[in-house]
Amino acid sequence: GAGVSQSPRYKVAKRGQDVALRCDPISGHVSLFWYQQALGQGPEFLTYFQNEAQLDKSGLPSDRFFAERPEGSVSTLKIQRTQQEDSAVYLCASSLPQTPGYTFGSGTRLTVV
Amino acid sequence: GENVEQHPSTLSVQEGDSAVIKCTYSDSASNYFPWYKQELGKGPQLIIDIRSNVGEKKDQRIAVTLNKTAKHFSLHITETQPEDSAVYFCAASMGYGGSQGNLIFGKGTKLSVKP
């Protein structure tokens, strides 16, 4: 597609529920990043994929967070047993290798109640 | 690790005036400095970037300057227009390939341009 597509746009989850957030990167973009953006803050790095390989997951805040990109295109960020502090906008970005500047999606706003 | 500080947090200007947003970074190994504009309900959009081997870069009404010695960089917007109103983020990374491309963002500046 023309841009990075994320779904759903909005998700309300009850505390303790599992959620799955989807990212469709730009076709051909090898690099894929997930960021978490709390209200009024800048995005914070969660994890990075190069094709299907998850090369950096140092930003994942706990073992409740899990990301995958099994075929090197679509990626899913899964959060188990959601907590209120997980409420944030989750942004996905993709880029070509060795190319400056990401293209971000519009994000998924997760609200845990 | 890298830390990026951004000032001011809010900035209000009259249409036609200039706006300046400043950022400092802590890790001298950082060498790529992009600026993103984020409108309400949208993801950040890259507006300009600079690499550490360049001191200044300009694109129409937008310019970025970099002082490697002082570890600070600034965004300059001239002849501001109401559509420039948004939240602006500076960021730093140690490159843009692979995991070196992880961006460390500032906390953002909310720019309001009054007609």
Image: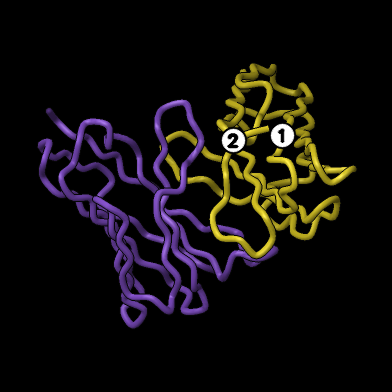
Residue B96, picture quadrant: bottom right
Of the chain colours in the picture, the one used for chain B is purple
Q: Residue at x 76, y 53 (%)?
A: A49
The color scheme shown is by chain
Under circle 2, the secondary element is loop
Q: Confirm whether circles 2 and 1 share one chain.
A: yes
User: Quadrant of the image for the N terminus of chain B?
Assistant: bottom right
Determine whether label 2 and label 1 are within 8 Å by CB: yes
Among numbered discs 2 and 1, the one appearing first in the sequence: 1
Q: Which residue is mark 1?
A: A23
Quadrant that contains the C terminus of chain B:
top left
| Crowd tier of the residue under label 1, counting other residues whose Cα lies within 10 Å: few below 14, some 14–19, many 20 or above | many
Tell me if B3 is positioned left or right of B69 in this view.
Answer: right
Report the chain holding disc 1: A
Q: Nearer the viewer, residue A88 or A25?
A: A25
Q: Quadrant of residue A12?
A: top right
**Label 2 amino acid?**
Gly
Residue lying at the far bottom in this picture: please name it: B69
Disc number for residue A75: none
Which residue lies at the image location 57% right of the left edge and 41% below the top edge? A104
Q: Which residue is mark 2?
A: A105
Q: Is residue B27 above or below residue A31?
A: below
Residue B73 placed where, x, y %?
32, 66
Q: Secondary structure at mark 1?
A: strand
Query: Horizontally, is A111 left or right of A77 in the view?
Result: left
Judging by colour alone, the chain drawn in yellow in this rendered image is A
Residue at the image position 38 percent from the left and 76 percent from the top = B54
Pinpoint residue B104: horizontal percent, then vertical percent.
51, 58
